[in-house]
Image (tube, rainbow, N blue to C red):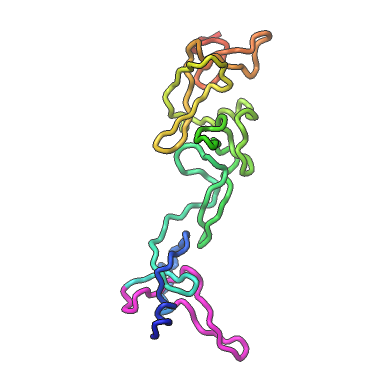
Amino acid sequence: LSENEVQTLYSEEPPPTAYSSLAAVQAPRLACHYLYLEGWRVRLRNFEDGTPCWYSRWYSRVGYCLRGRCTVKAEPLEIPCDGVRRSPGYATSCYYRCTKGFETLNVPYNNMTPCLIIGASGRPAGGAGICLNGMCKASYDLSPEEVKLAHPPGLVRCPEKEHTGRDILRSCYHYCRRNGDWYAGYFDSKPPSGCVMQYPARGNPLGWCCRGACTRKYNCEQL
């Protein structure tokens, strides 16, 4: 083989981000392209990307074909495109990258997946919401049932927090980062944790936080 032919067959060019286990079902090829007839003409065609090939000319190392060249790449972990969030913490976007064969796709999470939008400051831009058709529905638009969906027990892992400000809380949840991932936590139920009730009693719109809910009694006392 000439130097140019060797460079065509063997390359250290970075391979694509998604791979499947074609090597398990195909014998390695000597080259990543083959000749075929088109009418009276002989043409060159590449094998499908991912076809196993002999990276070493001494048949000791198997690689994968990529755009007509044999390259070496460890087989990565496949990420299913089923819309299910498997990563820890809140989704900070309602889209994620997954693998399908040799493609890397950007697909939406399933509806009702808890989400938390992070602003330019690196802090949450509002409270947790839920993904709907690829968009994070804002916390202030959530029904009481949706608020519960946005704060499942598995995501409530921040320590209980004391409210030290003079403002009235719009939500009885706060958010923190743990090992780089975002989680929710409760404001405590002491008197300073005053909040705006969604369905207040006549003439009294204020309540106190109690395990994420705004109630009419502080310290989670029953009416």
Q: Residue at x 60, y 38 (%)?
A: 136
How far from the left and from the top, in percent, is residue 139? Answer: 60, 30
State whether residue 140 is above or below residue 18: above
Query: Residue 127 sits in which quadrant?
Result: top right
Instruction: Tell which of 107 and 92 is nearer to you.
Output: 92
Instruction: Tell which of 45 and 14 is nearer to you.
Output: 14
Question: Which part of the image, by quadrant, shows the C terminus?
Answer: top right
Q: Residue at x 48, y 74 (%)?
A: 68
Q: Residue at x 52, y 30 (%)?
A: 151
Q: Magenta segment: does it hold 34? A: yes
Horizontal relation, residue 29 to residue 112: left or right: left
Q: Residue at x 50, y 43 (%)?
A: 85
Q: Residue furthest right?
A: 202
Horizontal relation, residue 140 to residue 190: left or right: right
How far from the left and from the top, in percent, is residue 207? Answer: 58, 13
How far from the left and from the top, in percent, is residue 120? Answer: 54, 37
How far from the left and from the top, in percent, is residue 81? Answer: 54, 52
**Magenta-drawn segment:** 32-60
State whether residue 26 is above or below residue 36: above
Instruction: Tell which of 123 and 145 is nearer to you.
Output: 123
